[in-house]
Amino acid sequence: MESRLLKLDEFDKIEIDIGKIVKNVTLVEARISDIETQFSAVDSRLIELERSRQFNSDECTELKTNYTELSTKMSAQQHTFETIFKDFGKIRADNKSLSDEVVDLKARSMRNNLLFFNFDEEHTFDDRKYENCANKIHEFCEKDLAMPDARDNIRIDRAQRIGNYETDSKRPLVVRFNYYQEILTVKQKVMDPACKVDKRVSDQFPREIQERRKKFIP
């Protein structure tokens, strides 16, 4: 658990660093735009003076000096911009790697979880508040899945509804089993063609993995 919290703290720090870099990139872009504007003004003035051929050598020298200084500033700002852009790319890569690690940690923490669907809701607020979801799962295993010793053989660490209550819907139950083998047993029972139940079960995955699965499973 401590390592997960450290990963999440590191994830937050990277997001803050990304925000700072984006701000710096914006400032550098503004500076480059300002220098480009000055370049344009100097170019216009040089063209105007060359056309009129009425400028003196001192003014021409000053303009050339200014042009050189602006060119140097432009090169420096461009270098700064490229450096920040590289740093931004590295942090984005680190952020992606850390995000993948966080998703992996979430998936591992859900390995012993199973979602149960189409279980009736309690009728009153108090009944829903004190609903014994673990007992419902044990009853389901005993009566519908023909597992008479379910209360003794299947250990449930935690069971609860997920989502907000709505009158015309049934919230799924998320159940954390003590042993992964118990999950396999329950899934096999429910998916057995001989088992005629109006309930269904599925593995629980982090939201990120669910979204990826939707792209491949219609």
Image (cartoon, rainbow, N blue to C red):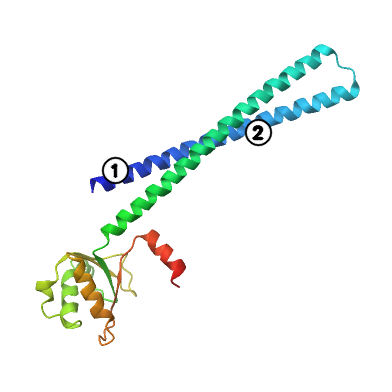
Q: Is residue 163 left or right of residue 138?
A: right
- The amino acid on which the numbered mark 1 sits, given as a three-letter code, is Leu
**Image quarter for residue 173?**
bottom left
Secondary element at tag 1: helix
Q: Nearer the viewer, residue 71 or 164?
A: 71
Pointer 2 local density, CA inside 10 Å: few below 14, some 14–19, many at least 20? few
At 21% from the left and 66% from the top, the residue drawn is: 180
Secondary element at tag 2: helix
On-image quarter of the C terminus:
bottom left
Q: Nearer the viewer, residue 157 or 94?
A: 94
From the top left corner, tell me how far across and down residue 83 is, in percent.
53, 33
At 9% from the left and 72% from the top, the residue drawn is: 152
Mark 2 highlights which residue?
33
What label sits on residue 34 in the rendered view? none
From the top left corner, tell me how far across and down residue 9 is, in percent.
32, 42
Q: Which dot, 2 or 1, sits closer to the camera?
A: 1
At 89% from the left and 17% from the top, the residue drawn is: 54
Dot 2 or dot 1: first in sequence order is 1
Q: Is residue 123 left or right of residue 22?
A: left
What label sits on residue 6 in the rendered view? 1
Q: Nearer the viewer, residue 23 or 186?
A: 186
From the top left corner, tell me how far across and down residue 168 is, in percent.
34, 75
Residue 132 visible here: no
From the top left corner, tell me how far across and down residue 120 is, in percent.
26, 77
**Image quarter for residue 136?**
bottom left
The residues bearing labels 2 and 1 have C-alpha atoms spaced at a distance of: 40 Å
| Extreme residue toward the top, this view | 58
Q: Is residue 54 left or right of residue 178?
A: right
Q: Is residue 203 left or right of residue 156?
A: right
- The amino acid on which the numbered mark 2 sits, given as a three-letter code, is Ser
